[in-house]
Amino acid sequence: MTRTGAYGERLGDFLRLAEAPPSLVTRSLRGTEIAVTETRNDNPVPGLSGSLAAEDAYLVSLKLRDYPDCELWEQGRHIKKADVHAGTTYLYDLKADPRYVIDKPLHSLHFYVPRSALDGLADQSGARRIDALDCGLVGHDDAIIRHIGASLRAGLRRPDEANQLFIDHMMLALTAHVAQAYGGYRHKAETGRGALAPWQLARACDKLESDLNGKLPLQAIAAELGLSVSHFSRAFRASTGLPPHRWLLHHRVRTAKRLMSVRGLSLSEVAISAGFANQSHFTRVFSATTGVSPGAWRRDALGTASRDA
């Protein structure tokens, strides 16, 4: 059976990498897999890349390193040789069997966007489905792709700390941007696109609080309220001022503060109880959010409590 899904290990095989590259996956658009993979090889064995299974899907490639004289092939034919520059974005149609000569160090982020994800995005908002993405061969600077890529690289480096809500949010934004910028997609406003009703907000917050680890996908929360993922994300932000993943992050910090107010708990125990992957993860997030380390905050809080007593 032919394997599809150009991300993770399959993309590593295509680029002849020795190990499976890191990838993050979301299934927030009706269960369709959208993924990002970071590929790097500082000492490649020269030769033509492998061949990916033909499928109705696209690779959006953000180059993180210059690649001079890149030779691109499609459908078994040499198409073009050109210099590829770090920071530029290329789109590849996987129906065309894109391949290229690997003979220099490479480093890229590849976003896997199947046709079903683009269709799901349009169907959720009642918009017309796009015909195809414009896969021009000339790389260009796409600031939004660069921003999303930079935001996701931390999760690729530390997958155990990756917040699924954040991954879902960023990949949904990536899909919408690609559809608009390269496919002519125009979002159709949904009815009732304001804030969530009080009962909806309460239920959404309950769901988020019940999974401090952030592994619950956006799709599950939106389905609980009978909303599309994009509608829920907008309405939740209108209600709270924060997207779901940021709200959960702040709630984790609030939870950690309550736990640190109890004497006897170690910072490691607080970290795990508040939904962080480990104490190091907890320290980075808490310090970035509050401006002080957890230890300094607790010393001040407990010292104040002792003086007040």
Image: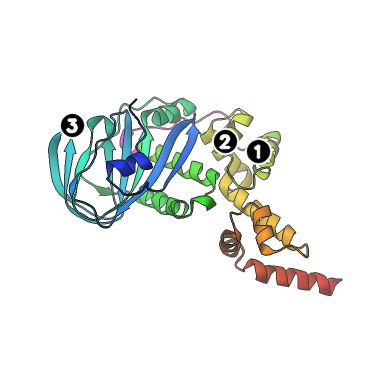
Q: Amino acid at mark 1?
A: Ala
Q: Residue at x 39, y 24 (%)?
A: 128
1 and 2 marks in contact (CB < 8 Å): yes
* Tag shown at residue 220: none
Q: Residue at x 78, y 65 (%)?
A: 263
* Quarter the C terminus occupies: bottom right
Q: Residue furthest right?
A: 309
How far from the left and from the top, in percent, is residue 118? 39, 31
Question: Is 304 in the magenta?
Answer: no
* Tag shown at residue 204: 1
Type of secondary structure dominating the magenta stretch: loop
First in sequence: mark 1 vs mark 2: 1
Q: Nearer the viewer, mark 1 or mark 2?
A: 1
Give the number of callouts: 3
How far from the left and from the top, in percent, is residue 181? 33, 39
How far from the left and from the top, in percent, is residue 208? 64, 42
**Circle 1: element type:** helix
Query: Where does the magenta region start and end?
Result: 180-198
Q: Amino acid at mark 3?
A: Gln
Q: What residue would you read off at disc 3? A: 75
First in sequence: mark 1 vs mark 3: 3
Q: Quadrant of residue 56?
A: top left
Q: Is residue 221 above or below residue 240?
A: above
Q: Amino acid at mark 2?
A: Phe
Q: Is residue 68 left or right of residue 247?
A: left
